[in-house]
Image (cartoon, rainbow, N blue to C red):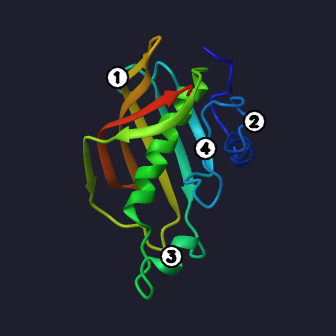
Amino acid sequence: MADYPTSFDKEDLLKCARGELFGPGNAQLPAPPMLMMDRITDVSADGGAHGKGHITAEFDITPDLWFFDCHFPGNPIMPGCLGLDGLWQLTGFNLGWRGWPGRGYALGVGEVKLTGMVRPDRKMLTYKIDFTKAIQTRRLTMGVADGIVEADGEMIYQVKDMKVALSES
């Protein structure tokens, strides 16, 4: 297990996007504007609902975010796929935080439910991810997790069996 802190501010996340946090060739977050969080408030390898690890993060919503201008003009809504991408980003971050080598990539998700929307008047999204499996073998490094996205405390997205892997090639 690597010795990283359990919370990260925006500058830490930008270091991760530049490949400076976990080192070259390892898990990276995307750079803005695709970086879908402003801070990680807690991360573990053994916490969460299943004792397999968790990660919690926040994203500040402001009316000037890039996607509100184009999705949809006159009826601005954050695309649901960006919330899903934020969940995938954080799942991969957790694997890198564990010290596991390789670059992250999404493998899929078993179930997605969107029950609310993110409009410009929302203030904050909270991502909560609980791992059901975290596997590291000679041939496979993968996390499987369930997650939710809350907007101002209201659950609006829910996913089950989200999968992210790390590959050294």
Q: Distance between the residues labelled 3 and 2?
A: 30 Å
Q: Nearer the viewer, mark 1 or mark 4?
A: 4
- Disc nearer the start of the sequence (1/4): 4
Does dot 2 land on a helix, a strand or a loop? Answer: loop
**Residue under label 1:** 50
- In this view, the residue farthest toward the top is 138
- Residue closer to the observer: 104 or 83: 104
Residue kind at label 2, given as amino acid type = Glu
- Residue closer to the observer: 168 or 19: 168
Residue kind at label 3, given as amino acid type = Phe
Does dot 4 land on a helix, a strand or a loop? Answer: loop
- Disc nearer the start of the sequence (2/4): 2
Q: Residues within 10 Å of mark 1 (few under 14, many from 20)?
A: few
Quarter in which the N terminus is drawn: top right
Residue drawn at point x = 42 percent, y = 73 percent: 77
Q: Distance between the residues labelled 1 and 2?
A: 30 Å
Q: Distance between the residues labelled 3 and 4?
A: 22 Å
Q: How far apart are marks 2 and 4 (CA)?
A: 11 Å
Residue kind at label 4, given as amino acid type = Leu
Q: Distance between the residues labelled 1 and 3?
A: 36 Å
Quarter in which the C terminus is drawn: top right
- Disc nearer the start of the sequence (3/4): 4
Relative to residue 55, is residue 6 drawn left or right?
right
- Disc nearer the start of the sequence (1/2): 2
Residue drawn at point x = 31 percent, y = 42 percent: 109
- Disc nearer the start of the sequence (3/2): 2
Q: Nearer the viewer, mark 1 or mark 2?
A: 2
Q: In this view, does 7 lie above or below 86?
A: above
Residue drawn at point x = 60 percent, y = 75 percent: 64
Q: Residue 20 bears which disc, if any?
A: 2
**Residue under label 4:** 29
